[in-house]
Image (spheres, helix red, strand yellow):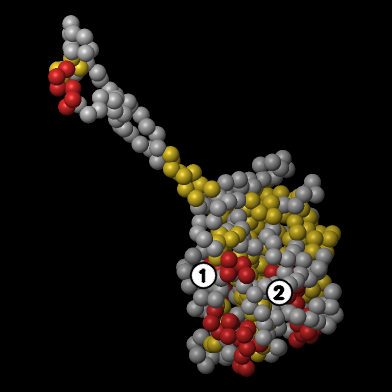
Amino acid sequence: MRRFKAALVAGLAVTMLFGCGKSSDEAVVGISVEKLEDVQDLTPVATEEASVEEEVVDEDAPPAEGMVRSYFTNQWVDEEVNNNRPIAVMYPINKEAQPQYGLSNVAVFYEIMEEGSMSRQMGILENWQDLNQIGNIRSIRDYFIYAALEYDPVIVHYGGPELYVSGVLTGKNRPNGVDDVDNLNGVGGKAMGPDYGAFFRVPEGSTSEHTAFTDGAHVKAAIEKAGFSLEHRDKFEGESHFKFTGYSNPNTLENYPDAVEATEIDMAGCFPVTKSALKYDADKGVYLKTLYGNPQKDALTGEQLSFENVVIQRTYHEVRDDNGYLAYQMHDTTRDGYFITKGKMIHITWEKTGDYAPTTYYDDNGEEVTFNTGRTMIFVIQEKGGSFSKFDVNGVTYAD
């Protein structure tokens, strides 16, 4: 950031004494006229008694050369981070799978219900290439693919129900017929783990669930071997994913008369097993995430997951078959939800009109919602009347 310094000068003190009864030509400060040639400068001298340094921050200027605003968080990042595609990582949410690696690099985080009353998470990771461990990694569902595409990522997953994933990954029955979903799949697909070296097991040799991991080097090598682009493709718009504001002018939602207090977000009614919840830290201006009543942390850094923005996105859903597999309609223009930031919540609507088009959120005045600079948590939940559609905010239940 550019810093401008201003010095405040105070206390000018100059005393000029003249000899009593003599002209100023005869005596100045007790020095005889004959000795005036010895005086080099009688100009009053300013004495600096105090100096205060004032710092002015120019938020629009990058803190270092080559830095730009992140497309997904609006935070300052190296330009290379914006040029490179993120990865969309499928994280299991099972209790025995915690803690997980690489969560501190998540820009946008999703939680969506799957079959068996269980939910799953997907993280959109920026600046992932230097991470020395990512995961563990589990299978994907097709609605996560639709959610991921708007970030133009390489999707990293370890399998998925073939019936409900393969068609999306091969372009069959896609809404817009897109057939270029780049993905690294540990058990099959275009870039297979065994063939492309994308994954490894911890402990080594294990074949049980929750033991599949990767890292930045493995992902990059597999992407290159598969022939995927490391940089964003032409279909990516190359613009801010959300409408952002900066730190100096945050969106406090105070301009909305119907905004309600939102410092305790309890999502147990939507995710009954994990009991995902968020608590607002007013000092830091972020929501801290918990799972199973405990802080959800990055195993690499020990940091608890935190978010400046929270979206609760109601979505049409169906139960597909007797196995309980679900479908969520990620393309829509008719559903609503809530936006939460700075300890407040407002009602919103949302729309997504194409695979690579960003999901856009609007307030009840029809204006696009302004997100605060930082990371975003998105809970995709069932629409009103669904089995898992209730949540509590500051003790108030929202169901209808």
Q: Is residue 34 visible?
A: yes
Residue at image location 57% in from the left, 46% down from the top: 248
User: What residue appears at the point 64 percent right and 51 percent down from the top-left corner?
Assistant: 245
User: Vertically, is 153 above or below 51?
Assistant: below
What x and y, as percent, mark residue 351? 80, 60
Q: Is residue 314 left or right of residue 9?
A: right
Q: In the drawing, does residue 293 fall left or right of residue 42?
A: right
Kind of residue indicated by mark 1? Asp
Residue visible at 54% across and 48% down in the picture:
58
Q: Is residue 352 above or below residue 130?
A: above
- Residue tagged 1: 298
Q: Which one is nearer the viewer's eye here, 271 or 81? A: 81
**Which quarter of the figure has residue 55?**
top left
Q: Which residue position is annotated with label 2?
A: 233
Kindly state the secondary structure of the residue where label 2 is placed: loop
For the residues bearing labels 2 and 1, Cβ distance under 8 angstroms: no
User: Is 240 placed above or below 220 here?
Assistant: above
Residue 350 location, quadrant: bottom right
Instruction: Give the image location of residue 192, x and y in percent.
Output: 65, 90
Residue type highlighted by circle 2: Arg
Considering every residue shown, the one lying at the far top of the view is: 21
The reply to whether residue 397 is visible in this rendering is no
What SS does tag 1 mark? loop
Where's the C terminus, which quadrant? bottom right
- Mark pair 2, 1: CA separation: 30 Å
